[in-house]
Amino acid sequence: MQRRKNLGTMKADSFGEIFLWNREMDCMIRVLQRKESSGILSKHEMRVYWVQLEEVRARLNADFAGRTATSERADQSRLKRQRTAWERKTPESNQKDLPQ
């Protein structure tokens, strides 16, 4: 039971971290826009930095999504095996009440 609770916390932490990562990237892009409007960066320089930031963001988000999908598929398979094993041990009279 403790292991499952830890996995849920780890998932929540991971999603929280990716949310914070994306929020901070948005902040960095706004800083670049202010630097352009104040004349510190040219429009071209700002766009180059902006594209680099978006490239890094996209890469990290894609890696996170891929790993999350793999992990969720593994969890789904493990939980399905647990459920079917439990159903095999449960008398038929109890199975009619289970959701499909």
Image (cartoon, rainbow, N blue to C red):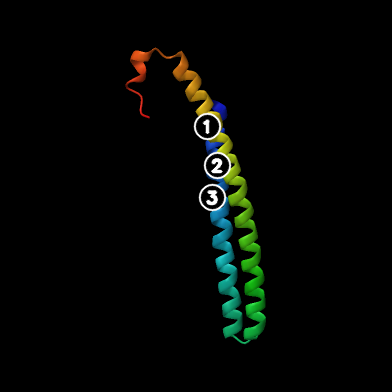
Q: Residue at x 57, y 45 (%)?
A: 69
- Characterize the local packing of mark 2: few (<14), some (14-19) or many (20 or more) Cα atoms within 10 angstroms: some
Secondary structure found at label 1: helix
Question: First in sequence: mark 3 or mark 2?
Answer: 2
Which kind of residue does numbered mark 1 sit on?
Answer: Lys
- The residue wearing badge 2 is 11
The residue nearer to you, when weighing 74 against 45, is 74
Question: First in sequence: mark 2 or mark 1?
Answer: 1
Instruction: Determine whether 61 is above or below 34 in the image.
Output: above
- The residue wearing badge 3 is 16
Real-space CA distance between mark 2 and mark 1, rounded to the nearest whole angstrom: 10 Å
Rendering coords of residue 70 (x, y %): 60, 42
- Characterize the local packing of mark 3: few (<14), some (14-19) or many (20 or more) Cα atoms within 10 angstroms: few
Rendering coords of residue 25 (x, y %): 59, 65
Which kind of residue does numbered mark 2 sit on?
Answer: Lys
Secondary structure found at label 2: helix
- Characterize the local packing of mark 1: few (<14), some (14-19) or many (20 or more) Cα atoms within 10 angstroms: few
Residue 47, image quadrant? bottom right
- The residue wearing badge 1 is 5
Rendering coords of residue 14 (x, y %): 57, 46
